[in-house]
């Protein structure tokens, strides 16, 4: 059966780029490298069963399919995009960096590997940073604001996926890696029974607080009271149970592909009908942006960012007995992500 393709504006990231670009200098550097790679194109995205809250036009970036356009790291296409001298200069600078050494020191500081580093970061400095990005405060820089826009587009498109086939009332949903509740709360408002979890206790506490404020505020005499999501502090490997739908947004960036395969299989084992994932795509452009960012890690860059080839993610799903039904890309200047919906094969 042919796969349905949907055009999804998105930010994926890179949601890690705020780690890289904090100061005006880093932001200007990033924009200088990024601006030639994107040309804005307007698309209308309208779900089959439209709702006033989920129908709107999006501006996204037109990005060429580099997996087919570039056949080698420095072929003619690449040189035409970046310019020969720019590539040579950039390669020389990148060769002097040692991001792996920095990551090793970060892991040693918290006494563990990637998971411990992620937990420590999102319970401390990372929590303050991402709470602002996911929130509505004006105390954000241009890069963070751009990432906020991208993340909101991701949430909107997931809601489209979930609502276009019917009501969510009574549907069980696992929000794996819930952050501050950006998806869990809209799901609860639509009547879903939400089980939400995050590796960060600080994130879970904030999600609970926002859910109580939002869902109680939304209560009126004519509409039934939404069921409060069940929030828990758990990593992905500890999740259990069975759900109609499992959603995991912007979490795979913390997993190398070797571990991501097992994580995808585990999430698929929890889902009965649908699995929705987002991840930072591994292409030449995005890999280059990531490496540029590593030149200027900044004091709050405390987690490693892993990109994933779509073919590898699809292969992992196939091994678990699932197939991709819908796929799309959401992109802004600093957030690029693939969003896929998988169903049992």
Image (cartoon, rainbow, N blue to C red):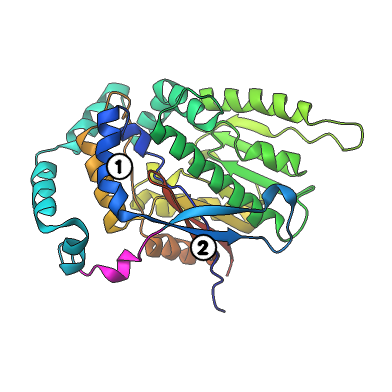
Does the magenta run of residues contain 67?
yes
Q: Is residue 73 visible?
A: no
**Vertical order, 205 against 332 (above or below):** above
Residue at 24% across / 33% down in the picture?
103
The residue stretch that appears in magenta: 62-71
Classify residue 19 by image quadrant: top left
Q: Nearer the viewer, mark 1 or mark 2?
A: 1
**In the picture provided, is 114 more to the left or to the right than 192?**
left
**In the picture provided, is 100 more to the left or to the right than 225?**
left
Q: Position of residue 98 (x, y in %)?
A: 15, 37
- Please name whichever residue, 88 or 186, is drawn nearer the observer in this view of the structure: 88
**In the picture provided, is 288 more to the left or to the right than 327?**
left
**Vertical order, 269 against 236 (above or below):** below
Classify residue 82 by image quadrant: bottom left
Mark 1 or mark 2: which comes first in sequence? 1
Q: Disc 2 marks which residue?
A: 327
Q: Position of residue 101 (x, y in %)?
A: 17, 33
Neighbourhood count class around disc 1 (C-alpha, 10 Å): few under 14, some 14–19, many 20 upward: some
Q: Where does the C terminus fall, quadrant-wise?
A: bottom right
Q: Disc 1 marks which residue?
A: 31
Classify residue 93 by image quadrant: top left
Q: Please state the total of marks drawn on the protein image.
A: 2
């Amino acid at each position: 059966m042919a796969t349905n393709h949907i055009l999804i504006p998105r930010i994926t990231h890179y949601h890690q780029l705020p780690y890289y670009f904090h100061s005006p200098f880093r932001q200007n550097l990033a924009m200088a490298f990024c601006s030639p790679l994107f040309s804005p194109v307007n698309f209308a995205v309208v779900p089959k069963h439209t709702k006033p809250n989920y129908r709107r036009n999006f501006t996204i970036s037109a990005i060429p399919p580099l997996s087919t356009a570039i056949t080698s790291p420095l072929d003619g296409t690449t040189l035409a995009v970046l310019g020969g001298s720019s590539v040579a200069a950039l390669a020389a600078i990148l060769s002097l960096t040692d991001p792996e050494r920095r990551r090793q020191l970060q892991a040693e500081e918290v006494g563990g590997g990637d998971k411990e580093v992620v937990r420590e970061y999102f319970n401390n400095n990372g929590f303050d940073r991402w709470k602002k990005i996911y929130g509505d405060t004006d105390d954000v820089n241009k890069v963070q604001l751009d990432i906020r826009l991208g993340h909101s587009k991701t949430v909107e498109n997931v809601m489209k996926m979930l609502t276009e086939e019917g009501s969510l009332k009574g549907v069980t949903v696992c929000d794996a890696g819930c952050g501050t509740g950006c998806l869990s709360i809209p799901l609860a408002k639509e009547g879903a029974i939400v089980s939400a979890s995050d590796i960060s206790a600080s994130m879970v506490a904030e999600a609970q607080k926002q859910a109580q404020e939002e869902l109680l505020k939304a209560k009126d005499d004519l509409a039934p009271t939404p069921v409060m999501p069940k929030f828990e502090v758990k990593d992905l490997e500890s999740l259990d149970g069975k759900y109609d739908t499992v959603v995991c947004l912007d979490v795979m960036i913390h997993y190398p592909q070797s571990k991501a395969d097992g994580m995808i299989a585990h999430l698929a084992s929890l889902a009965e009908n649908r699995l929705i994932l987002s991840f930072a795509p591994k292409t030449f452009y995005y890999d280059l942006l990531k490496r540029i960012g590593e030149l200027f890690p900044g004091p709050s860059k405390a987690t490693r960012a892993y990109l994933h080839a779509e073919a590898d993610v699809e292969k992992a799903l196939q091994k678990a007995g699932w197939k991709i039904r819908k796929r799309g890309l959401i992109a802004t200047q600093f957030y690029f992500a693939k969003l896929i919906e998988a169903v049992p094969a």
